[in-house]
Every structure is written in structure tokens, then in C-alpha cells.
Image: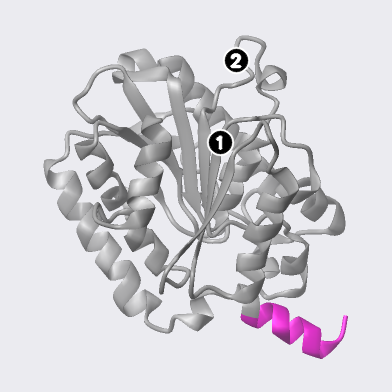
């Protein structure tokens, strides 16, 4: 690979480098909003879906029994972040009668990226099995996530649930919303992002949703910010092109004016078109 191409990939995929105010403005704002929300929300915090320390989730009930559950996976390039940073995302969905679960998982380089995929599957299976006691409907389970969480969402949509556990239905997930997702991980191998991921050719192929069949026929809303990089928007375009079919509805939506981080704010904005589209998909 030429130095010029490597530099191009770095510019296209190093999203934090494009937002120098992330640490001073973006993240502190999310922390504040999430802390304020948790103070009055009747959330069930740190529910264990596995035995490891980070195998836990926060569940925020909407107050409406037997209603849909939206499961959110955070971003951070699989190497940083935590569910508690994104509690604020749940607030407007609760007002629409949608329960929200926010999931934490182990981070690279402590674990391989492929291990995170397995943790995500365990988390969703746990939510499905415990939906009734949480007050939600196991038959109305939807998944979403941003950035690395968008990748996780796509991996979940590509899961054969019968191979995870014979008691799980093949249509366990009723819809997916990957936001600013990474569907082909091979370009990351030539960026500084891979220093902690340690992706090799085999794992990059195995963990790229774009390169594998899609057993789920559930609808998907595939989202990017309109101001995101050309490569990231192309990844979403390629994902929709690859999997859209007569039996699988795939809507592609760019959020006007939003970069890689502003799109999270749009998701949590009850007045945004993105929020309305997600609610429409979840409530059917």
C-alpha cells in the first residue's frame, strides 16, 4: 500500500481527528445529559447478561407494558466508551412507549473484536429471554448502534440465531438501525485505529458484515450523517446495495448537516427526521 493511500484511509476513518472539540465539548455534553437523565429515569442499571465485568446493560422502561424494546450499542471503535455515556439517547424513545436497553461490552485490545460480536449476541439473547420480567415484548426486539455499534448492529442482523441457541427464533430481531456503521473492516488495517484492534486479514474478513450472507429479512434503516466522510457514506451505500431485496426492506438515510458525532444528537432529538424514522420502524 502506498503512503498516499494509507494517509487517505487515515483521513477517512479517523473520525475523532476531524472533531478536535470531541474531548472538550462533545463528550462532556453527553456525560452531562446522561447524568441528568439517569437522576430521574427509573432505570434498571448494570443488569448482568454475562459473567465478565463489562457484560452488563442498563434498561430504561417506558412505562408501557409489553411494548417494543430498542437495544443500543455504543461506538468508540471497539476500544473505548461505555453505555453510561449514552443514557440520554433513551429519553425521547421512552416518551413514545419504547423501552431502551444500552449495552456495554469488553474493549480491544483486552479482547479480540470477534469476542465483542459474541458478547453482543449474548446480550440480545439475554434481553429476549428476560423481556417479560423487564416489562417488554420479546416479539418486538429491535437493535441499533452508532459507529462501532453500527457494525455490531449489522453483525447481529447477520446472525443465525438457531446456531447461538436452539430455543431462539430465527427472526429474533424485528428490525435494525445501523448508524454510521462500518461494514467492511479491511480499510482499518492500514490506519492507526488498528493499533489497538490488531485486525489481521482473516479477522477483518470474518467480522465484515458486507462480506457474509444476511439471514434476517427484517427491515433496516441504514443511516449516516450527511457531512460524514465519503468512505463511510459509501460503506452504508454498499451495505444497502448488497442486501436490499424484494423480501428485505432497506432504507438508506443521510442526516442533513450531521458529522459522525452530531448524528447521535439527531437520534436523541424528538423533533428530528431521524428520530421519527426510527420510531416508525420500531412501532411498525
Residue to which mark 2 is pinned? 168
Q: Quadrant of the C terminus?
A: top left
The stretch in magenta equals: 1-11
Residue placed most toward the observer, 90 or 246: 246
Q: Is residue 281 magenta?
A: no
Would residue 147 be found to the left or right of residue 88 on screen?
right
- Return the x and y of residue 17 as percentages of the image width and height: 52, 81
- The structure residue drawn at horizontal position 45% and vertical position 57%, both measured from the top left corner, is 81
Q: Image quadrant of residue 34?
A: bottom left
Relative to 131, residue 28 above or below = below
Q: Is residue 10 magenta?
A: yes
Total labels drawn: 2
Residue placed most toward the observer, 108 or 210: 210
Would residue 157 be found to the left or right of residue 19 on screen?
right
Question: Magenta region's main secondary structure?
Answer: helix
- The structure residue drawn at horizontal position 68% and vertical position 36%, both measured from the top left corner, is 158
- The structure residue drawn at horizontal position 43% and vertical position 43%, both measured from the top left corner, is 72
Q: Does dot 2 land on a helix, a strand or a loop?
A: loop
Q: Does dot 1 land on a helix, a strand or a loop?
A: loop
Label 1 neighbourhood size at 10 Å, few (<14), some (14-19), many (20+)?
Answer: many
Label 2 neighbourhood size at 10 Å, few (<14), some (14-19), many (20+)?
Answer: some
- Return the x and y of residue 275 as percentages of the image width and height: 34, 50
Q: Image quadrant of residue 214?
A: top right
Residue to which mark 1 is pinned? 219
Tags 1 and 2 touching, CB below 8 Å: no
Relative to 171, residue 270 above or below = below
Q: In this orientation, does residue 112 appear?
A: no
Q: In this orientation, does residue 238 appear?
A: yes
Question: Which of pointers 1 and 2 lies earlier in the amino acid sequence?
Answer: 2
- Return the x and y of residue 2 as percentages of the image width and height: 86, 86
Amino acid at each position: 500500500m502506498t503512503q498516499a493511500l494509507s494517509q487517505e484511509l487515515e483521513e477517512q476513518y479517523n473520525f475523532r481527528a476531524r472533531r478536535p472539540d470531541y474531548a472538550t465539548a462533545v463528550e462532556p455534553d453527553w456525560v452531562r445529559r446522561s447524568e441528568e437523565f439517569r437522576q430521574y429515569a427509573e432505570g434498571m442499571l448494570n443488569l448482568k447478561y454475562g459473567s465478565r465485568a463489562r457484560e452488563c446493560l442498563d434498561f430504561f422502561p417506558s412505562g408501557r407494558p409489553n411494548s417494543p424494546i430498542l437495544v443500543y450499542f455504543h461506538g468508540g471503535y471497539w476500544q473505548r466508551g461505555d453505555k453510561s455515556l449514552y443514557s440520554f439517547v433513551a429519553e425521547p424513545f421512552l416518551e413514545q412507549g419504547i423501552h431502551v436497553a444500552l449495552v456495554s461490552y469488553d474493549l480491544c485490545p483486552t479482547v479480540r473484536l470477534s469476542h465483542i460480536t459474541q458478547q453482543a449476541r449474548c446480550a440480545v439473547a439475554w434481553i429476549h429471554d428476560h423481556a417479560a420480567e423487564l416489562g417488554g415484548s420479546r416479539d418486538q426486539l429491535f437493535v441499533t448502534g452508532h459507529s462501532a455499534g453500527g457494525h455490531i448492529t449489522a453483525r447481529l442482523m447477520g446472525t443465525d440465531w438457531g446456531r447461538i441457541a436452539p430455543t431462539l427464533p430465527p427472526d429474533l430481531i424485528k428490525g435494525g438501525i445501523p448508524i454510521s456503521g462500518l461494514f467492511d473492516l479491511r480499510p482499518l488495517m492500514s490506519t492507526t485505529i488498528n493499533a489497538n484492534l490488531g485486525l489481521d486479514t482473516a479477522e477483518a474478513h470474518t467480522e465484515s458484515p458486507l462480506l457474509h450472507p444476511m439471514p434476517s429479512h427484517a427491515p433496516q434503516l441504514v443511516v449516516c450523517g450527511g457531512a460524514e466522510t465519503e468512505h463511510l457514506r459509501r460503506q452504508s451505500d454498499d451495505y444497502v446495495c448488497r442486501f436490499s431485496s424484494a423480501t428485505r426492506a432497506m432504507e438508506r438515510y443521510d442526516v442533513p448537516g450531521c458529522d459522525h458525532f452530531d448524528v447521535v444528537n439527531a437520534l436523541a432529538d424528538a423533533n428530528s427526521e431521524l428520530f421519527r424514522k426510527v420510531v416508525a420502524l420500531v412501532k411498525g
